[in-house]
Image: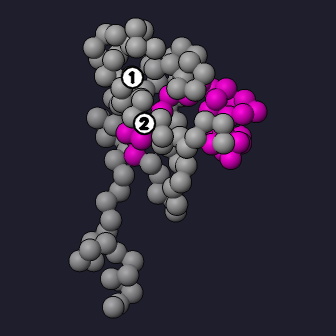
Amino acid sequence: MTFIAITKGPLGQKADKPERGTAEARRHIEQVKRLPCIICGRPGPSDAHHCYCDRFGQRKAPDFETIPLCKECHQVGPMAIHNDKAGWVERNGPDHGFLPRVADMLRAEDDGILGEWL
């Protein structure tokens, strides 16, 4: 096996990059930002946090793997995921575990029943 075959995907092709920055991905991010914080329930607008728990390497998560977090739960507060990842995971579980709930919230928002669902 040659060096090229080891560093490339099947048949020497580069592996697919995660979907980021497309028009559809940007729309999804904007929808996630309108949701309340998935942790504390603070009403939106929220930050769209790209899930990174249990990820390895430098590849960033796709824009579709985002959860809504208020500034306090995301970056600013002492218990924010970007300030204390291990503590955050211990308290809340891995961030990617919230993706199914976010999908449900987005469907409820589309159906006009998000307030009832929360």
Picture coordinates of residue 9 (x, y %)? 31, 72
Q: Quadrant of residue 10?
A: bottom left
> Which corner quadrant holds the N terminus?
bottom left
Q: Quadrant of residue 74?
A: top right
Its colouring scheme is one colour
Q: 77 or 101: which is nearer to us?
A: 101
Looking at the image, the residue that sits furthest to the bottom is 1
Residue at left offset 72%, top offset 34%: 79
What residue would you read off at disc 1?
105
Question: How many marks can you see?
Answer: 2
Q: Please check the rendered image and state whether residue 84 is part of the magenta-colored stretch, yes or no.
A: yes
Asked if one can make out residue 82 in the rendered structure from this viewpoint, the answer is no
Where residue 27 appears, as percent x and y from the top left, is 33, 29
Q: What is the three-letter code of the residue carrying label 2? A: Leu
Figure check: 76 above or below 118:
below
Residue drawn at x 40%, y 14% as measured from the top left: 117
Q: Which residue is mark 2?
A: 99
**Magenta span covers which residues?**
62-89
**Within the image, what quadrant is residue 24 found in?**
top left
Q: Earlier in the sequence, mark 2 or mark 1?
A: 2
Q: Is residue 17 left or right of residue 50?
A: left
Vertical arrangement, residue 86 with respect to residue 45, above or below = below
Along the line of sight, the residue nearer the viewer: 96 or 56 = 96
Q: Is residue 3 above or below residue 100?
A: below
Could you tell me residue 31's position as x and y percent? 38, 24
SS state under label 1: helix
Q: Residue furthest right?
A: 78
Residue drawn where x is 36% and y is 26% of the image: 104
Compared across the picture, whether 55 is left or right of 20 comes to right
User: Image point 38% across, 81% down: which residue?
Assistant: 6
